[in-house]
Amino acid sequence: MSRLTIWGCLIVLMKIPSRVGGAIRRLDLRARLGACGHGVFLGSGFRIENPEYVQLGDNVYFNDQCWISTVPPEVGAQAPTLIVGANTYVGRFAVFACMQKIEIGQKVLISDRVFISDSLHGFRQLGVAVADQPIFSPGPVLIGDGSWIGIGASILPNVKIGKQCVIGANAVVTHDVPDFHLAVGVPARVTRRIDEKTLTNNIS
């Protein structure tokens, strides 16, 4: 029993530096963000490129292993802007790629493994590898207050999702979704307006 206790203590001691280092890195990130509200939580493995272009509102919560990539202005046509509104939750393994503008409203629920991007790789130059073609932004991504983005969904460039929308699991959103509507499928299509009748049908 004493031997197990000693090994247990050693394991705990070995973990302390990584935990402290992770906390220090997250504090450093907060200091370098373009704006950071109160109560922001950044989970373990959180990664961000060019944090000065990112603004996080109060009580934004990023779960573990999320990645935010913003393209600096020397690569893009303008400085990018990525805004996450207050009280928004972002699930594990989410990826945000921003070249122009991504704006996520307040109290948005973003499930695990969601991909949101306002940019694409060029691919029209025949004989040139896609990796060697420039990236570009067809337009911004806007997500309205109170919406829910289902697990594994992809939100592609030049898309506006309205207020309190629901995007189904694994959907690929390529067109706008009006306020209070449900969109599902690949590519996603708007199937119905969310109202009391919709809720009753879903429950029954």
Image: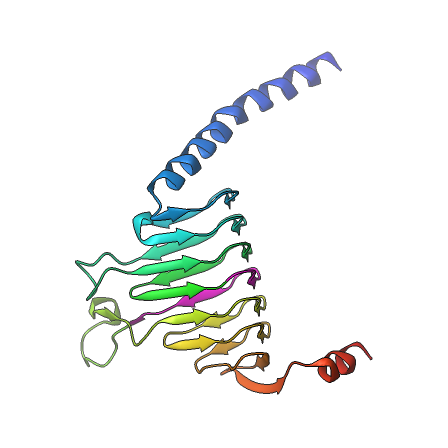
Q: Is residue 164 above or below residue 15?
A: below
Furthest-top residue in this view = 2
On-image quarter of the C terminus: bottom right
Residues shaded magenta: 106-120
Q: How many marks?
A: 0
Instruction: Determine the residue located farthest toward the right in the rendered image.
Output: 204
Identify the residue at horizontal 18%, vertical 78% (top origin).
127
* Vertical placement of residue 17 versus 182, above or below: above
137 up-or-down from 81: above or below: below
Give the colour scheme of this rendering: rainbow
Q: Is residue 132 left or right of residue 46?
A: left
The residue that appears at 60% across and 87% down in the rendered structure is 191
Residue 35: give x, y in percent of width and height.
Answer: 37, 48
State whether the magenta stretch is mostly helix, strand or loop.
loop
Between 10 and 108, the one nearer to me in the picture: 108
123 is within the stretch colored magenta: no
Q: Nearer the viewer, residue 27 or 68?
A: 27
| Residue that appears at 55% across and 63% down | 108
The quarter in which the N terminus is drawn is: top right
Q: Where is residue 122, by image quadrant?
A: bottom left
Residue 97 position in % (x across, y down): 36, 62
Is residue 108 magenta-colored?
Answer: yes
Q: Residue at x 48, y 30 (%)?
A: 18
Quarter occupied by residue 200: bottom right
Front-most of residues 29 and 178: 178
Left or right: residue 125 compared with residue 87: left
* Percent coordinates x, y for residue 54 in the rendering: 36, 53
Provide residue 52's location: percent of width, then percent of height. 30, 48
